[in-house]
Image (tube, rainbow, N blue to C red):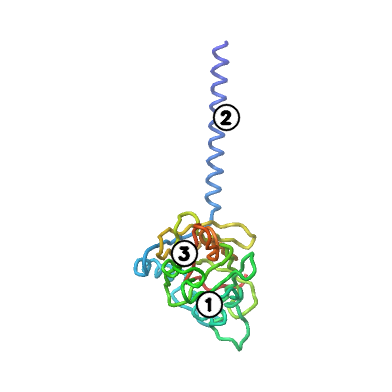
Amino acid sequence: MKNKNNIRLLIAMVAIIFAAATTSCKKEETVKEQLPISEVLKATGDSLSISATLAQFKSLLGDSLNTAPGKIGGRREINWDAVPVTFQDNNTFPSDFFAQTDVALPNGRKRGAVFTTSLANDLRISSNGFDDVYAGFATQFKVFSKKLIFGSMNGNIVDVTFKVPGQTTDATVKGFGVIFLDVDKNDKTSLEFFDETGKSLGKFFAIANDAKFSFLGVKFKDASKVTKVRITTGEEGIGKIASSYDKVAMDDFLYDEPVAK
């Protein structure tokens, strides 16, 4: 009788373990199904080394490069060369420089991207590779598309939000990419994407390559809508010259045509 009870107890325990394992698997499968589907493109090296990956990402976003408001489909690009001397080599770059709505302003300033940081006067456009900040930076921050580059001076986080180009209407995108300059450490420089509810859709890291270009682009293939991209550049702002923590600048930005929420 005792043996029979032991057998019954053993069978019951096996059944419980099996049920728990099955439930766990189902939960894991559900989580996987809920994750956004994305295509991540990365490349590093000189301009030739990243050119094929960059071209592939442009095609994913949309082969048409849009340069005026009122477009459907296609993509937008920012290479900073439309920024006038007034906003170069100082910390006065306006967060909404590329999100203007005034019809009197050139179309180049109507690209639907807004840049913000938690610190005042933190964004800087450099015409000399930040060599005026610290002699020797220009040898590290090589320029991809001549001649202006972009960086955060005191902090290392820049948030990008979107507007319908030429309008005040909030917008979303499906993909976003950046050419980073002088990424020294892996798992530090990244792009994190957020949806309309503020939920993170994923954080993706650039490949490190000292004094070279590191391209990172992410395109979502499901129904996810990106309202904000958080860019983390290295470990600290470019202006923190007294330390050896990784500092990273940026050149070209690419994203698909922003559409109204």
Label 3: state its secondary structure: strand
Q: Residue at the far bottom: name it.
A: 104
Distance from label 1 to label 3 (Cα)? 21 Å
- For disc 3, the marked residue is 217
Please report the residue visible at 56 percent of the width from the left and 61 percent of the height from the top: 193
Q: Residue 209 appears at what percent x and percent y?
A: 40, 60
Please report the residue visible at 46 percent of the width from the left and 63 percent of the height from the top: 216
Q: Mark 2 or 3 closer to N-term?
A: 2
- For disc 1, the marked residue is 72
Task: Please tell me whether residue 246 is drawn above or below residue 147 in the rendered image.
Answer: above
Q: Residue at the far left: name it.
A: 48
Work out which quarter of the rendered image holds the C terminus and state it. bottom right
Q: Which of 2/21 is in front?
A: 21
As shown in the figure, which amino acid type bears the numbered disc 2? Answer: Ile
Residue 223 appears in the figure: no
Of circles 1 and 3, the one toward us is 3
**For the residues bearing labels 1 and 2, Cβ distance under 8 angstroms:** no
Label 2: state its secondary structure: helix
Q: How many marks?
A: 3
In the rendering, which numbered label is found on residue 16? Answer: 2
Q: Which of 224/96 is in front?
A: 96
